[in-house]
Amino acid sequence: MNGNTAVNWKTQKPYRGINTMLLDPGEYVKFKQVQEAKGKVKKGAKSEIVVFWKWIETKNKDTGKEEKIPFLRYYRVFNINQCEGIESKRQEEETFEHDPIEEAENIIKGYINSPSFSYNSGRAYYQPSIDHINIPPMKDFRQVEEYYATIFHETVHSTGHTSRLKRNGITSATAHFGSEEYSQEELVAEIGASMLTGLAGFVDVTFNNSVSYIQSWLRKLKDDKTLIVKAASQAQKAIDYILGVNYKEED
Protein backbone atom coordinates (compact mmCIF):
# COMPACT_ATOMS: atom_id res chain seq x y z
CA MET A 1 0.00 0.00 0.00
CA ASN A 2 1.08 3.60 -0.41
CA GLY A 3 2.35 6.27 1.96
CA ASN A 4 -1.09 6.87 3.44
CA THR A 5 -0.86 3.72 5.53
CA ALA A 6 0.69 2.89 8.89
CA VAL A 7 4.18 1.42 8.51
CA ASN A 8 7.09 0.37 10.68
CA TRP A 9 9.59 3.26 10.55
CA LYS A 10 12.67 1.03 10.52
CA THR A 11 11.55 -1.52 7.91
CA GLN A 12 8.91 0.57 6.06
CA LYS A 13 6.71 -2.52 6.02
CA PRO A 14 2.96 -1.81 6.37
CA TYR A 15 1.15 -3.07 9.45
CA ARG A 16 -1.45 -5.72 8.74
CA GLY A 17 -4.63 -7.22 10.14
CA ILE A 18 -6.21 -5.51 13.13
CA ASN A 19 -3.33 -3.00 13.22
CA THR A 20 -4.76 -1.24 10.16
CA MET A 21 -7.70 -0.30 12.38
CA LEU A 22 -5.64 0.57 15.45
CA LEU A 23 -3.18 2.95 13.81
CA ASP A 24 -3.62 6.16 11.85
CA PRO A 25 -1.47 6.58 8.71
CA GLY A 26 2.17 7.31 9.42
CA GLU A 27 5.51 5.82 10.45
CA TYR A 28 5.73 4.15 13.84
CA VAL A 29 8.72 3.37 16.00
CA LYS A 30 9.37 1.48 19.23
CA PHE A 31 10.83 3.37 22.19
CA LYS A 32 13.99 1.26 21.96
CA GLN A 33 14.37 2.17 18.28
CA VAL A 34 14.07 5.85 19.17
CA GLN A 35 16.90 5.44 21.66
CA GLU A 36 19.04 3.52 19.16
CA ALA A 37 18.56 6.34 16.64
CA LYS A 38 19.70 8.88 19.28
CA GLY A 39 16.26 10.48 19.25
CA LYS A 40 13.73 11.03 22.00
CA VAL A 41 9.98 10.85 22.52
CA LYS A 42 8.30 14.19 23.11
CA LYS A 43 7.05 14.83 26.62
CA GLY A 44 3.43 13.77 27.10
CA ALA A 45 3.32 11.63 23.94
CA LYS A 46 1.00 8.64 24.19
CA SER A 47 1.91 5.31 22.61
CA GLU A 48 -0.29 3.08 20.46
CA ILE A 49 -0.70 -0.70 20.57
CA VAL A 50 0.51 -2.96 17.76
CA VAL A 51 -0.68 -6.57 17.78
CA PHE A 52 1.25 -9.37 16.14
CA TRP A 53 1.38 -13.13 16.13
CA LYS A 54 4.16 -15.61 15.50
CA TRP A 55 4.56 -19.37 15.42
CA ILE A 56 6.15 -20.90 18.51
CA GLU A 57 7.19 -24.48 19.11
CA THR A 58 5.74 -26.28 22.11
CA LYS A 59 5.23 -29.83 23.29
CA ASN A 60 1.72 -31.24 23.10
CA LYS A 61 0.75 -32.35 26.61
CA ASP A 62 -1.35 -35.23 25.31
CA THR A 63 0.90 -36.65 22.58
CA GLY A 64 4.30 -35.43 23.75
CA LYS A 65 5.08 -34.34 20.20
CA GLU A 66 6.54 -30.98 19.23
CA GLU A 67 4.08 -28.75 17.42
CA LYS A 68 3.80 -25.16 16.26
CA ILE A 69 1.03 -22.91 17.54
CA PRO A 70 0.18 -19.24 16.81
CA PHE A 71 1.01 -16.92 19.71
CA LEU A 72 -0.60 -13.47 19.98
CA ARG A 73 1.38 -10.59 21.52
CA TYR A 74 1.43 -6.80 21.46
CA TYR A 75 3.88 -3.96 21.88
CA ARG A 76 3.69 -0.17 21.96
CA VAL A 77 4.84 2.30 19.33
CA PHE A 78 5.01 6.05 18.76
CA ASN A 79 4.29 7.99 15.59
CA ILE A 80 7.54 9.66 14.48
CA ASN A 81 5.68 12.99 14.71
CA GLN A 82 5.73 12.39 18.47
CA CYS A 83 9.51 12.10 18.42
CA GLU A 84 12.52 14.37 18.05
CA GLY A 85 15.57 13.38 16.03
CA ILE A 86 13.69 10.78 13.95
CA GLU A 87 13.52 11.58 10.24
CA SER A 88 10.96 10.08 7.87
CA LYS A 89 12.11 7.25 5.62
CA ARG A 90 9.14 7.59 3.32
CA GLN A 91 9.90 7.24 -0.35
CA GLU A 92 7.72 8.39 -3.21
CA GLU A 93 4.25 6.97 -2.81
CA GLU A 94 3.58 3.85 -4.84
CA THR A 95 0.19 3.09 -6.33
CA PHE A 96 -1.07 0.10 -8.27
CA GLU A 97 -3.42 -0.36 -11.20
CA HIS A 98 -6.01 -3.12 -11.00
CA ASP A 99 -9.05 -4.32 -12.89
CA PRO A 100 -12.13 -4.80 -10.70
CA ILE A 101 -13.21 -8.38 -9.98
CA GLU A 102 -16.75 -8.63 -11.32
CA GLU A 103 -17.93 -11.34 -8.90
CA ALA A 104 -16.71 -9.33 -5.91
CA GLU A 105 -18.27 -6.12 -7.21
CA ASN A 106 -21.61 -7.90 -7.62
CA ILE A 107 -21.52 -9.07 -4.00
CA ILE A 108 -20.90 -5.54 -2.75
CA LYS A 109 -23.54 -3.97 -5.01
CA GLY A 110 -26.07 -6.62 -4.00
CA TYR A 111 -25.85 -5.75 -0.29
CA ILE A 112 -29.30 -4.28 0.43
CA ASN A 113 -29.65 -1.96 3.44
CA SER A 114 -25.88 -1.52 3.44
CA PRO A 115 -23.99 1.13 5.42
CA SER A 116 -22.52 4.19 3.71
CA PHE A 117 -19.06 3.84 2.15
CA SER A 118 -16.06 6.12 1.68
CA TYR A 119 -12.78 5.33 -0.07
CA ASN A 120 -10.07 7.35 1.65
CA SER A 121 -6.46 6.28 2.06
CA GLY A 122 -5.41 5.22 5.53
CA ARG A 123 -7.30 2.87 7.77
CA ALA A 124 -10.04 0.45 6.82
CA TYR A 125 -12.77 0.49 9.46
CA TYR A 126 -16.44 0.10 10.23
CA GLN A 127 -17.91 2.77 12.53
CA PRO A 128 -21.16 1.48 14.08
CA SER A 129 -22.18 4.84 15.59
CA ILE A 130 -22.75 6.31 12.12
CA ASP A 131 -23.08 2.98 10.27
CA HIS A 132 -20.20 3.78 7.94
CA ILE A 133 -17.34 1.86 6.27
CA ASN A 134 -14.11 3.43 5.04
CA ILE A 135 -11.86 1.47 2.70
CA PRO A 136 -8.57 2.69 1.19
CA PRO A 137 -8.93 2.97 -2.60
CA MET A 138 -8.05 0.02 -4.82
CA LYS A 139 -4.87 1.73 -6.05
CA ASP A 140 -3.43 1.58 -2.51
CA PHE A 141 -3.36 -2.23 -2.52
CA ARG A 142 -0.57 -4.26 -4.07
CA GLN A 143 -3.01 -7.12 -4.73
CA VAL A 144 -6.57 -6.43 -5.83
CA GLU A 145 -7.71 -9.51 -3.90
CA GLU A 146 -6.55 -7.90 -0.64
CA TYR A 147 -8.68 -4.87 -1.48
CA TYR A 148 -11.81 -6.97 -1.74
CA ALA A 149 -10.90 -9.12 1.27
CA THR A 150 -10.65 -5.90 3.29
CA ILE A 151 -14.04 -4.70 2.06
CA PHE A 152 -15.59 -8.07 2.88
CA HIS A 153 -14.12 -8.01 6.41
CA GLU A 154 -15.61 -4.60 7.19
CA THR A 155 -18.87 -5.45 5.44
CA VAL A 156 -19.34 -8.51 7.66
CA HIS A 157 -18.74 -6.28 10.69
CA SER A 158 -21.51 -3.98 9.46
CA THR A 159 -24.10 -6.77 9.54
CA GLY A 160 -23.84 -6.70 13.34
CA HIS A 161 -25.43 -3.24 13.46
CA THR A 162 -28.64 -2.81 15.47
CA SER A 163 -30.59 -2.31 12.24
CA ARG A 164 -29.42 -5.69 10.94
CA LEU A 165 -28.34 -8.77 12.94
CA LYS A 166 -27.55 -7.06 16.28
CA ARG A 167 -24.37 -8.96 17.21
CA ASN A 168 -22.92 -8.26 20.64
CA GLY A 169 -19.46 -7.68 19.19
CA ILE A 170 -20.82 -4.57 17.45
CA THR A 171 -23.68 -3.41 19.69
CA SER A 172 -22.29 -4.09 23.18
CA ALA A 173 -20.73 -1.20 25.08
CA THR A 174 -18.22 -3.64 26.59
CA ALA A 175 -16.89 -4.89 23.23
CA HIS A 176 -13.59 -3.03 23.50
CA PHE A 177 -10.22 -4.11 22.12
CA GLY A 178 -8.93 -7.18 23.95
CA SER A 179 -12.32 -8.25 25.28
CA GLU A 180 -13.81 -11.65 24.49
CA GLU A 181 -16.68 -10.01 22.61
CA TYR A 182 -14.22 -8.04 20.46
CA SER A 183 -12.14 -11.13 19.73
CA GLN A 184 -15.26 -13.12 18.86
CA GLU A 185 -16.39 -10.40 16.46
CA GLU A 186 -13.01 -10.41 14.71
CA LEU A 187 -13.38 -14.15 14.18
CA VAL A 188 -16.85 -13.64 12.70
CA ALA A 189 -15.60 -10.91 10.35
CA GLU A 190 -12.58 -12.83 9.08
CA ILE A 191 -14.42 -16.14 8.66
CA GLY A 192 -17.17 -14.29 6.82
CA ALA A 193 -14.62 -12.49 4.64
CA SER A 194 -13.06 -15.85 3.76
CA MET A 195 -16.47 -17.18 2.76
CA LEU A 196 -17.07 -14.19 0.51
CA THR A 197 -13.65 -14.41 -1.14
CA GLY A 198 -14.50 -18.03 -1.93
CA LEU A 199 -17.77 -16.97 -3.55
CA ALA A 200 -15.87 -14.32 -5.51
CA GLY A 201 -13.41 -16.93 -6.74
CA PHE A 202 -10.10 -15.90 -5.18
CA VAL A 203 -9.96 -17.56 -1.75
CA ASP A 204 -6.61 -19.22 -2.54
CA VAL A 205 -4.90 -15.83 -2.86
CA THR A 206 -5.91 -14.62 0.62
CA PHE A 207 -6.23 -17.99 2.38
CA ASN A 208 -2.93 -17.96 4.30
CA ASN A 209 -3.50 -14.46 5.66
CA SER A 210 -7.02 -15.36 6.76
CA VAL A 211 -5.96 -18.58 8.47
CA SER A 212 -3.19 -16.80 10.38
CA TYR A 213 -5.55 -14.02 11.42
CA ILE A 214 -8.25 -16.45 12.56
CA GLN A 215 -5.76 -18.57 14.48
CA SER A 216 -4.33 -15.55 16.27
CA TRP A 217 -7.76 -14.48 17.54
CA LEU A 218 -8.69 -18.03 18.41
CA ARG A 219 -5.54 -18.16 20.53
CA LYS A 220 -6.67 -14.94 22.19
CA LEU A 221 -9.87 -16.78 23.09
CA LYS A 222 -7.77 -19.47 24.83
CA ASP A 223 -8.10 -21.93 21.96
CA ASP A 224 -11.74 -22.70 22.76
CA LYS A 225 -12.75 -24.57 19.61
CA THR A 226 -16.46 -24.16 20.40
CA LEU A 227 -16.08 -20.43 19.85
CA ILE A 228 -14.97 -20.86 16.25
CA VAL A 229 -18.05 -23.01 15.61
CA LYS A 230 -20.24 -20.24 17.02
CA ALA A 231 -18.33 -17.61 15.04
CA ALA A 232 -18.71 -19.62 11.83
CA SER A 233 -22.46 -19.84 12.41
CA GLN A 234 -22.69 -16.08 12.94
CA ALA A 235 -20.50 -15.51 9.89
CA GLN A 236 -22.85 -17.61 7.76
CA LYS A 237 -25.82 -15.53 8.94
CA ALA A 238 -23.87 -12.39 8.02
CA ILE A 239 -23.13 -13.76 4.54
CA ASP A 240 -26.77 -14.71 4.03
CA TYR A 241 -27.77 -11.18 5.01
CA ILE A 242 -25.28 -9.58 2.61
CA LEU A 243 -26.38 -11.87 -0.23
CA GLY A 244 -30.05 -11.37 0.58
CA VAL A 245 -30.83 -15.05 1.05
CA ASN A 246 -33.02 -16.57 3.74
CA TYR A 247 -32.94 -20.25 4.60
CA LYS A 248 -35.63 -21.72 6.82
CA GLU A 249 -34.36 -23.81 9.71
CA GLU A 250 -34.91 -27.53 9.16
CA ASP A 251 -36.85 -29.52 11.75
Image (cartoon, rainbow, N blue to C red):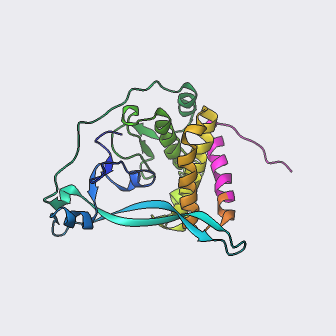
As for residue 245 lying within the magenta part, the answer is yes
Residue closer to the observer: 2 or 138:
2
Q: Is residue 159 shown to the viewer in this render?
A: no
- On screen, 218 above or below 249? below
How many numbered tags mark residues here? Answer: 0
Q: Is residue 14 shown to the viewer in this render?
A: yes
Q: Is residue 179 left or right of residue 85?
A: right
Please give the name of the residue rendered at 23% of the width and 44% of the height, measured from the top-left corner.
Answer: 90
**Where is residue 112 shown, x and y percent of the image?**
57, 35
**Where is residue 82 shown, x and y percent of the image?**
19, 60
As for residue 128 lying within the magenta part, the answer is no
Residue closer to the observer: 11 or 224:
11
Please give the name of the residue rendered at 46% of the width and 33% of the height, measured from the top-left corner.
Answer: 144
Residues shaded magenta: 229-251
**Quarter residue 39 falls in:** bottom left
Q: Main secondary structure of the magenta part?
A: helix
**Where is residue 63 shown, x and y percent of the image?**
72, 71
